[in-house]
Amino acid sequence: MTAHVLAGALADDGRRRIFAAIVLGATSATEVAERTGLPARAVITGIRRLTDAGLVTGADGALAADEASLRATARDSRPADVAEPGVDPVLRTFLRAGALVGLPAQRGRRRVLLAHIAEQSFEPDTRYPERAVDDALKPWCAAGGSDHATLRRYLIDEQLLTREHGIYQRL
């Protein structure tokens, strides 16, 4: 079973109710129908679909959730850690495809992330007008994890960029 199959099997409200009844101890279609209030035909169809998806075992006897299949799906559906060895865990956590997915609340972690952004976006001792800084920071914000003005402010607060008369510079 894949995560996609699991999601599809539980996308229907009736099947979720059927699955919940089985997880909570219903062992036959009759018990499931009594607990869910669903018609017998809907229960039988739902049980068959849940069994086909690998969520339920014992369609001919005592019904039960297939816990082994659920565990295997959870284990197999975890995203692989495709990060390069040695990449900082903060960067792996808060960057996806070169865009921020969020900003760390802890100052130390946020500084690691901001230092990376500053190093990747700005050359040392080069002067940048505010518009150029904004243009350099906007791609980092494509995933909606922050906005360029917030990044610019944090970069200045952390003294990764300096600002004087509307001109920015990485030291």
Image (spheres, helix red, strand yellow):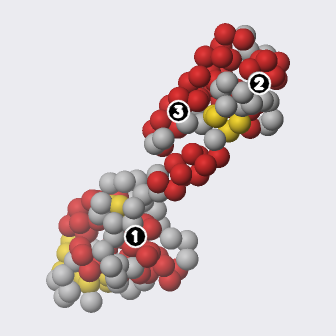
* Element under disc 1: helix
Viewer-proximal residue among 46 and 165: 46
Look at 55% across and 36% down and name the residue there.
Answer: 54
Say if 82 sits above or below 49 in the image.
Answer: below
Look at 29% across and 63% down and name the residue there.
Answer: 98
Viewer-proximal residue among 42 and 85: 42
Front disc: 1 or 2:
2
Q: Distance between the residues labelled 3 and 1?
A: 33 Å
Q: Name which of mark 1 and mark 2 comes first in the sequence.
A: 2
* Label pair 1/2, CB-CB below 8 angstroms: no
**Type of residue at label 2?**
Ser
Front disc: 3 or 1:
3
Q: Name which of mark 2 and mark 3 comes first in the sequence.
A: 2
Residue 120 seen in render? yes
**Type of residue at label 1?**
Arg
The C terminus - image quarter: bottom left
Viewer-proximal residue among 139 and 150: 139
Look at 33% across and 66% down and name the residue there.
Answer: 82
Q: Mark 3 packing: few (<14 Cα in 10 Å), some, or many (20+)?
A: some
Residue 125, percent from left and from top = 19, 88
**Type of residue at label 3?**
Ala
* Element under disc 2: loop
Q: How far apart are marks 2 and 3 (CA)?
A: 18 Å
Residue 28 has which mark? Answer: 2
Viewer-proximal residue among 157 and 142: 142
